[in-house]
Amino acid sequence: MRTVTRRDAVAIISGSAVTMMSQNKSAAGSQSTLGAAAAGSGLMFGAAAGYEIDKDVGYRDLYTDEARIITTDTALKMGSIAPQPGAKHFESADRLLKFCATNRIPMRGHCVIWNEWVPQWVRSMSKSERQTFFDGYIEEVVGRYIGKLHSWDIVNEPFWPGHKAPGGYRLGPWYDAFGTDYIRRAFERANSVDKTTKFVLNEAQTERDDDVGLAVRAGILKLVRELKDGGVRLNAVGLQGHLQPKYPHDPQRFAEFVHELAGLGVDIYITEFDVRDDTFPDDIKARDEMVAKTAEQFLNTVLRIPAVKVVIAWELADKYSFYTDAAKKKDPTSVRMPRPLPYDSELQRKPLWFAMQRAFANAKRA
């Protein structure tokens, strides 16, 4: 058997791009936005949005064209709302909410409680002070947006096996204050002030078919059972969908996990979709095609599951990806920047856009 070299791989991928381009042109004519393609299959597509849409008119226009739902990126995280003692800062979130309302796009809130992104002044509180702050913060923040949001990520990323805590839970100031009961408490406290907005438990790493991913899946299944059995209002589970090809992924096993999760009586949202490309070739054409293939295979599997209702990209264009921020901080002189999103840094559609469009248009809802 002849060994396939990197040059061979690039040639194969480049050759297949010609066929894909003709498919892309015909598909784009019938469903010209990702939002429309998803809606045609009974799905909702959108993206997270940061402060960039306030200053980049072209980027802002992408949201009005493409998105049928928008998630706050950092505007509703505790580090943005309460960076220091005193008055809370809702200006960025309120500005995005006004943009969404003007354009009749539902907005999701991300996130009320997370053991990361907690300001140091809160971390420095005593245990009893943190407990009091926890309750009051939830009531104030959730109460401010009653009736204004499509859904709220009430608790974000409760699991991280790397912390070696019992059950694989993520450690942090809220875990320290309440143990794992902080999760139930957060949902119940939020429900005490808002009984209509959809409440979501959001988690990362479940796409990985390794020890970390399997441990997070097991933890989420157990936690959701406990919350539902305890009468906690939980409408949906968010599976972030940061695809990381350097880790194994078994589509069938992942689908079985999602089916089992849906069987517990929750909708499924893919909440932070993108494709990490650091293990792919430097060649942009080859890399873009590999990103597109990775995304399409994932979506073709997961979108067959009726409980999956929403797919949200984590931003829309490469230059505003958090992976790009991280890469620039790591090496400001690097010429290779991440390309994980459907639009490039010039706001042009990439193969990933067309792959997502095909997956939405072809979604077979059982």
Image (tube, grey):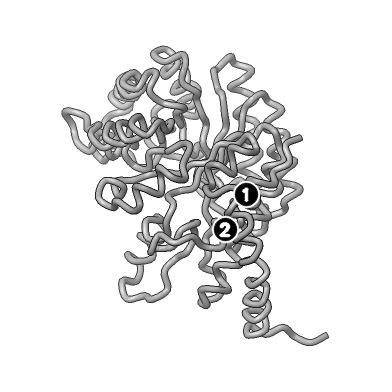
Decide which of tag 1 and tag 2 comes sooner along the chain: 1
Q: Is residue 150 visible?
A: yes
Q: Secondary structure at mark 2?
A: loop
Left or right? Give the position of 144 relative to 276. left
Please report the residue visible at 52 percent of the width from the left and 53 percent of the height from the top: 274
Total labels drawn: 2
Instruction: Quickly name the residue at label 2.
Output: 244
Position of the N terminus, as image quadrant, is: bottom right
Please report the residue visible at 46 percent of the width from the left and 42 percent of the height from the top: 67
Spatial separation of the CA atoms under disc 1 and disc 2: 8 Å
Residue type marked 1: Glu
Q: Is residue 166 visible?
A: no
10 Å crowding of disc 1: few (<14), some (14-19), many (20+): many
Tell me which corner region of the image, top left, top right, bottom left or bottom right, holds residue 78: top left
Position of the C terminus, as image quadrant, is: top right
Residue 364 rendering spot, x and y as whole percentages: 73, 41
Left or right? Give the position of 107 relative to 223. left
Between 83 and 37, the residue placed more toward the observer is: 37
Instruction: Quickly name the residue at label 1.
Output: 207
Q: Secondary structure at mark 1?
A: loop
10 Å crowding of disc 2: few (<14), some (14-19), many (20+): some
Q: Are marks 1 and 2 in contact (CB under 8 Å)?
A: yes
Residue 224 rendering spot, x and y as whole percentages: 61, 27
